[in-house]
Image (cartoon, grey):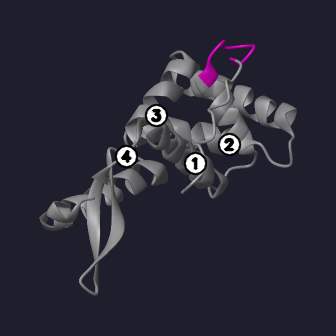
Amino acid sequence: MRKARAKKRVLLPDPIYNDTLVTRFLNNLMYDGKKNTASTIFHDAIGIVAQRTSEDGLEVFKKALANVTPQVEVRSRRVGGSTFQIPTEIRPDRKISMAMKWLISYSRKRNEKSMAQKLAGEIVAAAKEEGASFKKKEDIHKMAEANKAFSHFRF
């Protein structure tokens, strides 16, 4: 039998925006424990987003995150010797972490000068329902839709 599930750690809200979602994003953005650097990058990116869209930067960020958040995913399951891709609902915690990781990874692949500009570009694109991270969500939903016939194998 497995041991007890690990307890969820309580995150302190971000000191500037007073939001735990921002803290979670910073923790994903951070490399080598350099939280200050990650914080600077994020806050600069939010400033750039506010300039480009002439709206509140944090609201645009939250909208972008909501647009990138997936609802279903496909998981592999072996049934009778063959493997099926079965569409399943995603836990709320996992949805958010997937969306954050996609935003960060696809912004790192962009062709702008600084990481703050790359992140700002990806956030603005995701808020407009375009960009690589939004495309990733769409692809996952298409895959789940295509494999809907196997949903009766769900566990």
Q: Amino acid at mark 4?
A: Ile
Q: Quadrant of the N terminus?
A: bottom right
Q: Amino acid at mark 1?
A: Lys
Q: Residue 59: horizontal and vertical position, in percent?
A: 50, 19
In the rendered image, which quarter is residue 33 located in? top right
Q: Amino acid at mark 2?
A: Asn
Residue with the mark numbered 1? 101
Do the CB atoms of the residues marked 2 and 1 lie less than 8 Å apart?
yes
Q: Quadrant of the C terminus?
A: bottom left
Highlighted range, magenta: 13-20
Q: Residue at x 68, y 50 (%)?
A: 112
Q: Give the mark toward the camera: 1 or 3.
A: 1
Instruction: Please tell me whether residue 12 is drawn above or below residue 26 in the rendered image.
Output: above
Name the secondary structure under disc 2.
helix
Q: Is residue 91 or residue 52 the one in the foreground?
A: 91
Q: Is residue 97 magenta?
A: no
Q: Residue 53: horizontal and vertical position, in percent?
A: 51, 24
Q: Residue 3: horizontal and vertical position, in percent?
A: 61, 49
Residue with the mark numbered 3? 64
Q: Residue at x 41, y 56 (%)?
A: 136
- Asked whether residue 148 appears in the rendered view, the answer is no
Q: Give the mark toward the camera: 2 or 4.
A: 4
Q: Is residue 16 magenta?
A: yes
Left-right relation of 5 to 113: left
Residue with the mark numbered 2? 28
Q: Amino acid at mark 3?
A: Ala
Indicate which disc residue 69 carries: none
Residue with the mark numbered 4? 90
